[in-house]
Amino acid sequence: MNRAPIACCALILTASAPAIAPAQDQPPLTWQTVPAALEQAEREGFSGSVLLVRDGEIVLNKGYAFADREKKIPNTPATIFALGSTPIDFTHVAILQLQGAGKLDLDDPITEYFDAFPDDKRTMTLEHLRSGASGLPDFPYLPGVDEDPDHSPLSRDEFIERARNATLLFEPGTDRVHSHFAWGVLAAVVEVASGQSYRDYITTHVLEPAGMTRTGFHGQRFPGETVAIGYDSRTWGEINSPEHWGETSWLVMGSGGMVGTNEDLFRFNRAINDGTLLPPGVLRLYPSSAVYANGNMYGFETYYNHGGDNLFYLNCNNSNPMSPVYDLQGLARSLEQLCDDRPPPNFSIGLMMRPGPDSIIVGDVVSGSAAERAGLRKGDVLLAANGVDFDPHAPLEALRPGIEHGRPLRLRIERDGRAILLTLRPEPLAP
């Protein structure tokens, strides 16, 4: 299970590259050529379904290849797939709903919900967990203890005990690194704050209000519906399909362990934007736009974007076929570019950024890059570029003149509490 987003939960954003690795030697897709391109991708090995939205309206919604090869059951728009780390978004909504209802506060320490946390974690807050600043490692899985990183049984109490005993990567609040573990802790907080199980809360407060009838949890059966089988080198159980994997373990609760469809993910996007799921007072805390790549080790991948009028949703149940020309990431990147109103970057700055709740932080500086020559360092806080303040929800906007047109960027940063001015001169990307 993994996630690679842009501008969400303090994960890495790269100003010199797209969210998804670019397709190689492929002309850009157009709305006219995308149907033929998807059919070609199917011939090359793609198996799954794709939904495309243009100017707010669905213009393509189709399945490709087979949900079950042995029985020759095709993928369709209604096929249900494992969603990888997509449930992080559902947990995020649940936490913000409970914040809006006054049942929790993001500044609450974890000890408000669970006792006996040791001293190194007693300052950890819900905001730290939500923003990647908790210091918890990425996964609670223990090699040699758990048979499988996703599916081995683990109760909530056992999971929280692992959180108590986990070795932190850093002191809470002093750095930002994405953690599935942290979202699992927030799922447990949802249970304590709401008085419902996480599964019941998500079903009644997220899925049902959004009309997501084909979204649920591992082990759940959907009578009359098709749940895809995953095709990869790693499998789980006699039938490698989420309805046969058993109930969702707390190894992945809150950050995985769920299934759904492209249509339901689109309904989720609409329910965020129209206020169905989040009241105005907390909507501002949810990312206004993002691109996500979610997957697991059992053949399933999920790609989609959030925000804007042009959207793409791609679910795949054949993430790594034996084909020299199959490029799932390239296909997803092409769909991302199709839906992006702006052209892809033409210039590189060699800078990786971590979005926080109220600021943008330099996550890393590429050796020999324009950013390094400008004097930028890991940990610098980016305040403005050419007088335009950095927006945590749209961090590339202040950099557009540089990455699209190569114009020098006069950066205002903060380092060790001091304001510093630097000039960054972008470099052309290799053709």
Image (cartoon, rainbow, N blue to C red):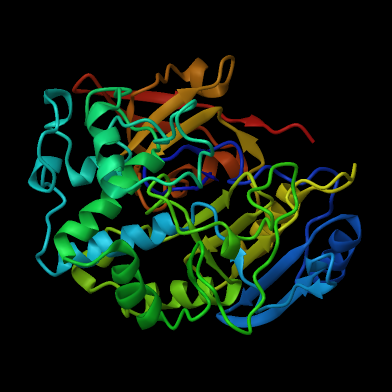
| Left or right relative to 90: residue 119 | left
Establish if 290 lies above or below 49. above
Question: Would residue 337 be visible to someone looking at this image?
Answer: yes
| Left or right relative to 152: residue 9 | left
Picture coordinates of residue 113, whole percent (x, y)? 12, 48
Establish if 236 lies above or below 284. above
In depth, the one of 64 and 230 nearer the eye is 230
Q: Quadrant of residue 331?
A: bottom right
Q: Quadrant of residue 353?
A: top left
Picture coordinates of residue 40, whole percent (x, y)? 89, 62
Instruction: Name the residue rendered at 42%, 52% in the picture.
Output: 394
In depth, the one of 286 and 138 nearer the eye is 138
| Left or right relative to 402: residue 156 | left
Q: Quadrant of residue 335?
A: bottom right
In depth, the one of 160 and 372 nearer the eye is 160
Instruction: Name the residue rendered at 67%, 55% in the picture.
Output: 240
